[in-house]
Amino acid sequence: GLELFDYPQIIKKMMDLGTVKRKLERKQYATAHECATDIRLIWTNCLTYNSDGSDFWLLAKSISRRFEDRYKKIKNEYDVGESSNITSPSNNRNNNNNNSNGGSNNNNNNNGDTTGNIDEPSLDEKADLASKIFLLSGIELAHIITMLENRAPMTLEHVGIHSDNVEINIDALDFKLFT
């Protein structure tokens, strides 16, 4: 190991990327906010344990900023579970018993027609796809990138100095491409 004998004395709540990955794979996060909290804890622990200006400290600071920038974009588009006023299914049931709106409220689609939700995957489904992309072999990933270049080039973002570095914008994907 790294022989960080004093780490448990300095860092009281430990967290690492391997733990976050396992929790994601086991679907142990109820919300994206819970996952983000654990990820923030990783960077905070790194900044706390390492000396200001050290390589690890600078890396944690940089990655933390990048994470917050991306998470902010996600927060602006999706419910990440930060609000304590999340509507529960029981609240929906109680509201549906009151027909004072004449049934014009279409927020709750309990009529058996679920086709409206197929086009827009949930945040969890997008996160699941993103994690599965990381498991692809080089050849499989090249096939996906080629397909996206041909069918949906707006989903690819070339990053860095080298144009070979490509990020897939999961939010811009039309999931019908994969059906």
Image: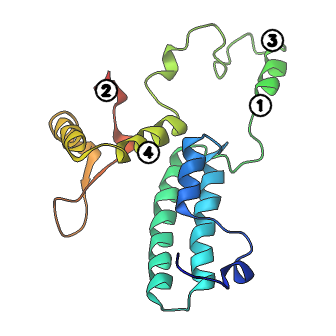
The residue beneath circle 2 is 178
Point out the tag, 4 or 1, that comes first from the N-terminus.
1
| SS at badge 1 | loop
Nearer the observer, 35 or 119: 35
User: Which residue shows up at 60% across the image and 48% down it?
Assistant: 23
Q: Nearer the viewer, mark 1 or mark 2?
A: 2
Point out the tag, 1 or 2, that comes first from the N-terminus.
1
Query: Which corner quadrant holds the C terminus?
Result: top left
| SS at badge 3 | loop
Residue type of the residue flagged with mark 1: Ser
Residue type of the residue flagged with mark 3: Asn
Point out the tag, 2 or 4, that comes first from the N-terminus.
4
Q: How is the image coloured?
A: rainbow
Residue 17 got which mark? none
Q: Nearer the viewer, mark 2 or mark 4?
A: 4
State the count of labels. Answer: 4
Residue type of the residue flagged with mark 2: Phe
* Up/down of 154 relative to 103, above or below: below
| SS at badge 4 | helix
The residue beneath circle 3 is 99
Q: Is residue 168 left or right of residue 13?
A: left
Residue 131 got which mark? 4
Q: Nearer the viewer, mark 4 or mark 3?
A: 4
Q: CA distance from mark 2 to mark 3?
A: 40 Å
